[in-house]
Structure formats: C-alpha cells, structure tokens
Image (spheres, helix red, strand yellow):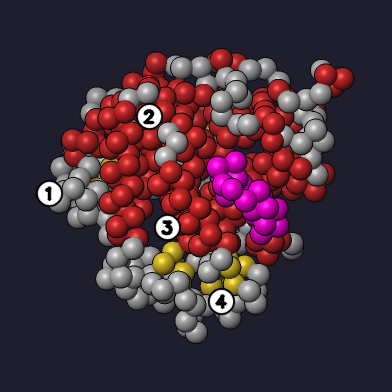
Amino acid sequence: MTRERGASPEGRIRTNRISPKAVLTPALAAIGERYRRELFEEYFPFWDRFAVDHERGGFFCWLDYDGQRVSDEKYMWYQGRGLWIYAHAYRCFGHDSRFLEIARKTYEFLLAHGRDEEGLWRRSVGPNGEPTEPADGMGYAGMFVAEGMQELARATGDATVLENALVACRLSRRLFDDPTRNAKPDYLPVHYPGLRLLGHEMVRIRFLTQVLQHHPDAVLQAELAEAVAHVLGPFHHPLHQLTSEALDHERQRPADANEDFFLLGHAMETMWMILDAVPLLKDPSIQDTAIQRFRRHGDASWDKARGGFRTAVSLSHGPLPGRLLWHHDEALIGNLMLYALTGEARALEEFFRIDDYTTKTFRVSGRSGPVWALEADDNGRPPARVSRMGNYHLPRRLMLCLEWLEAIEHNRPANLK
C-alpha cells in the first residue's frame, strides 16, 4: 500500500495495539487505494469547487448531487465538522497548505460569527455570519465546534485554539447537564426536560479522547472515564443487551416509549470510539466489552433479507424505514478496528460485506463525478434529488480507515514484508 502525501501511522494509531494476526491482504490494500482515490480525487475536489467558502470561511452543505447550492445558510454542526476534516487531513496526510488555509478560515469565521451575545453557539448563520437562528439548545453544535478546534490545535500547536476548544466543550457540557434543558431531539418517541442522551456521551468521549492524545490532563482523564462508564453502565439495557439512546436526567429508564427505542447506529459509533479510548483508560477489559457490544448492535441492525443497516429500532413498533450512509461509515470504521485489534476473520468479512453494500447503494453520479447520497430506502435506492450533502462521516471514514490500514501494514512481522 503506497503512503502518498507523507501519511504515516506513527503518532496517530498505537501500532503496538495491532494484532499480529491482522495482515494487509491484497483485497484490503486495493480498498485502501480506492479509499485514497475517493478522498483525494473525488471528495476534496467536489467540496473545494462547490461547498468551501474560500472568501469568508466555512462550508455550504445545502447542495444537490451536482453541487448546485440550495441554501447559503451555514449550520454550526457542519462548520465544526468540516473544520475537523480539513485540520485532520492537513495533520495526517502530508501537511497540504490548502487544507490548513481552509481550516484556519473556518476557525476564524466561527470565532467571529458562531456565538450569540451570551457566548452560546448558534444553530446557524448566513453566508456572511449574520444570525439566522438562536443558540443550539441541544449542545451538539458546540461539541462539533470544539472537536474541530482541538484538531486544528493539534495540527498547529496553537494553545489559544485548544483553550477555545475546551471552553466550547465546557459550555456544551453545561447544556448536557441542565435538568431544565428542553431542546427536543426529533428522533425520540418521547421527550421531556433534561433527557440524558447517548449522543451526548458519544461526542464527549470522542472529544476527550482526541484532546488527551496530545494534551494530558487529569481532570479530562476523569471525565473520559466517567463518560465511558455511563455508556457501558446505565445506558446498557440489561434485558435487551442493547444501548439505550435516552434516559431521564437521573440516568434511570422510565417505562415509556423510549424504553425499548434504540439508535443502533449511535451505539456502534460509540463503541468504536470507546475502543479508540482504551489506551487512555485504566481498565483494559473495556476493550473486550466494547468489541462484544459493537458486534451485538451490528447483528441487531443488519437486515438479513435486503442488506444494509436499520439505524433506529423500536422493539414495540419495529425498525424505522430507510438506510443511512453515516451508520454504514461508522460500521466500516469499527469493523476495520476490530480486525486490526484482533485479527479475526469475522471482522474482515463484515468489513468487506459492508463496504460492498455501501458503495453499491450510496455512491451515485453527479455532474462533476461520483458523489454519495446520505440515505436510501429499504431496498437500497437513494433519492433521485437531494438538498444536502455530508461533510463529515464519509471523509472521516475514508481517512480513519486509511490510517488503520497503514498501521496494519506498518506493524506486519518481518517475514511478511
């Protein structure tokens, strides 16, 4: 597998975690080369041409398959996510100055326009930064901004950027912990103030893991252990052996419609994030627990008749219809991690199966070349037209999988070279 653009696994993935049974097979190497093409010859050129605001900073995500802009509104979720993608691409794939320029302009746009008078992160702004919606009451916007900022700090060594990331994280944590928080997740069957969400713990785990990899801190270390304990403890449904999406503010499970509702994609995503955090935790047995639960949620969500993952399931009413690209992206990251850490054939077979389904289902033709639909119906048919493109899960999957593949190659025994 060719390491183009100066990419190296050193300092990103602990190669001493790679199982000696994990081998970069020719089929895996071919997927790696394809992922590299999809990332550098398709994804980044499309976004550079149609979605990056090179003048003012930030990203336009309301696009169709052809790159035609449907709206100029800039949502904070996507600004923070895009900041992470470009800062990570700069840091881990050759220090391309164009990626850093886009990341820096996005960061400056966020600082100038992303917060309201109280310092809370807005849901969205206009193309020039003019407010269009009030603060995000859920706290997700601030966490994605924080994640993007910490990655830029990691790429540049700028302590001020890191401090701004930590401030954004603390503001979101305050919202997560507010018993009166009444922002409503649109996917839950039942809503009431102060809900504890798996999604909140997930983004907190991811942010803290990444910060601690380059900024050791005892307080943040304790917060990471706490968040992991919440996911593996109260959020775990002992009867169904699945991870709940919502608990009440005291982390109890009331007997309501949320009790048997599971966002299986979030659970799989969270479990690979916990796997990535294991070297920072004091309990190595967490790795086995996360692997077992990742597989349990994959088995529970895969449609054996038609293929693809069913992302949300109510055990009382059945699965919600449709297929979502992001769930498949996260499953690919997780299964490749499982193969790298265990060398087990099952994980590799799952990776190949999911990659085949994902590519055949979500990869569509746009005027400027192949692009990716964010969703499809139960039969694997994406919509003929869309008004939004994704700037996070897909490129993150491509980059992280490339890094795990390079770590497997780097760690191979001498007799396999």
- The residue singled out by tag 4 in the image is 260
Q: Nearer the viewer, mark 3 or mark 4?
A: 3
> How busy is the neighbourhood of tag 1: few (under 14 within 10 Å), some, or many (20 plus)?
few
**Viewed as shown, does residue 33 lie left or right of 174?**
right
Q: Which is more N-terminal, label 1 or label 4?
A: 1
- Alpha-carbon span between mark 4 and mark 1: 40 Å
Q: Using the rendered view, name the quadrant where residue 19 is placed.
A: top right
Q: Which residue bears the numbered disc 2?
A: 152
Horizontal and vertical percent for residue 23? 79, 31
Q: Residues within 10 Å of mark 2 (few under 14, many from 20)?
A: many
**Position of 329 relative to 380 (above/below):** above
Sequence-first disc among 3 and 4: 3
Q: Amino acid at mark 4?
A: Asp
What residue is disc 1 on? 117
Q: Position of residue 112 (x, y in %)?
A: 18, 35
Q: Outermost residue, bottom direction?
A: 255
Distance from the alpha carbon under mark 3 to that under mark 4: 19 Å
Callout 1: SS? loop
Q: Are marks 1 and 2 in contact (CB under 8 Å)?
A: no
Residue hosting label 3:
200
Instruction: Look at the picture and state if 283 lies above or below 235.
Output: above
> CB atoms at circles 4 and 1 under 8 Å apart?
no
Give how far apart the Cα atoms at labels 4 and 2 are.
Answer: 39 Å
Cα–Cα gap, marks 1 and 2: 25 Å
At label 3, which amino acid type do we have?
Answer: His
Residue at image x 59%, y 72%?
237
Disc on res. 197: none
> Is 276 covered by the magenta stretch?
yes
The reply to whether the magenta stretch includes residue 213 is no
Q: Is residue 114 visible?
A: yes
User: What span is in magenta?
Assistant: 274-294
Q: Residues within 10 Å of mark 3 (few under 14, many from 20)?
A: many
